[in-house]
């Protein structure tokens, strides 16, 4: 079992930055990547992939955030999403996610809210 806990969300104005963190704990040998998804509560929009990073260090990004967001693995099991030049379209609940390497089991954090508004 793996636990994922997000933090760092908040309310910012367009053009500002936020840094989200996801701390993973538990059986880390059962996963080999961590990614971030976002979803706007109360809308029909599906949960959207934002960025992911493998434990080998390979990162990939959604087109909508390329050049603005950077995902890194910091000391320990912290996965940080640096978000720059935020826009109102980035407003969402951001979730950390991973999946068991050998079983059909997904791990989700509860999420951290990001609101971008003037």
Image (cartoon, rainbow, N blue to C red):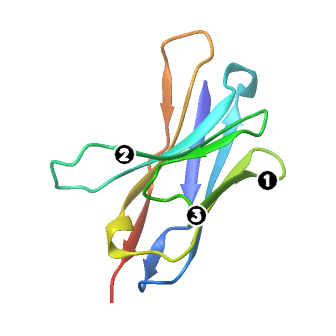
Q: Secondary structure at mark 2?
A: strand
Q: Quadrant of the N terminus?
A: top right
Q: Secondary structure at mark 3?
A: loop
Horizontal placement of 14 versus 60: left or right? left
Q: Secondary structure at mark 1?
A: loop
Query: How many tags in the picture?
Result: 3
- Residue labelled with disc 2: 48
Quarter holding residue 80: bottom right
- The residue depicted at 84 percent of the width and 52 percent of the height is 75
- The residue depicted at 72 percent of the width and 39 percent of the height is 58
**Dot 1 surroundings within 10 Å: few (below 14), some, or many (20 or more)?**
few
Establish if 31 lies above or below 60. Answer: above
- The residue depicted at 82 percent of the width and 46 percent of the height is 76
Q: Which numbered disc, 3 or 1, marks the residue closer to the eye?
A: 3
Horizontal placement of 32 versus 13: left or right? right
Establish if 49 lies above or below 68. Answer: above
- Residue labelled with disc 3: 67
Residue 48, x across and y down, in percent: 36, 45
27 or 45, nearer to the observer = 45
- The residue depicted at 37 percent of the width and 73 percent of the height is 115
Q: Are marks 2 and 1 in contact (CB under 8 Å)?
A: no
**Dot 3 surroundings within 10 Å: few (below 14), some, or many (20 or more)?**
few
Instruction: Estimate the spatial distance between the alpha carbons at disc 3 and disc 2, rounded to whole Å.
Output: 17 Å
Mark 3 or mark 1: which comes first in sequence? 3
Establish if 103 lies above or below 12. Answer: above
Say if residue 91 shows up in the picture.
no
Q: Which numbered disc, 2 or 1, marks the residue closer to the eye?
A: 2
Residue 23, x across and y down, in percent: 66, 48
Quarter holding residue 32: top right
Q: Residue 74: which disc? A: 1
Horizontal placement of 84 versus 42: left or right? right
């Amino acid at each position: 079992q793996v636990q994922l806990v997000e933090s760092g969300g908040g309310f910012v104005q367009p053009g500002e930055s936020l840094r989200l963190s996801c701390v993973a704990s538990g059986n880390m040998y059962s996963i080999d990547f961590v990614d971030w998804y976002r979803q706007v509560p109360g809308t029909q929009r599906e949960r959207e992939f934002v960025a992911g990073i493998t434990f080998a260090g390979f990162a990939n990004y959604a087109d909508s955030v390329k050049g603005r967001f950077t995902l890194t693995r910091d000391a320990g099991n912290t996965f940080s999403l640096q978000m720059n030049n935020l826009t109102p379209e980035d407003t969402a609940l951001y979730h950390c996610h991973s999946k068991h390497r050998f079983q059909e089991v997904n791990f989700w954090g509860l999420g951290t809210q990001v609101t971008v508004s003037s």
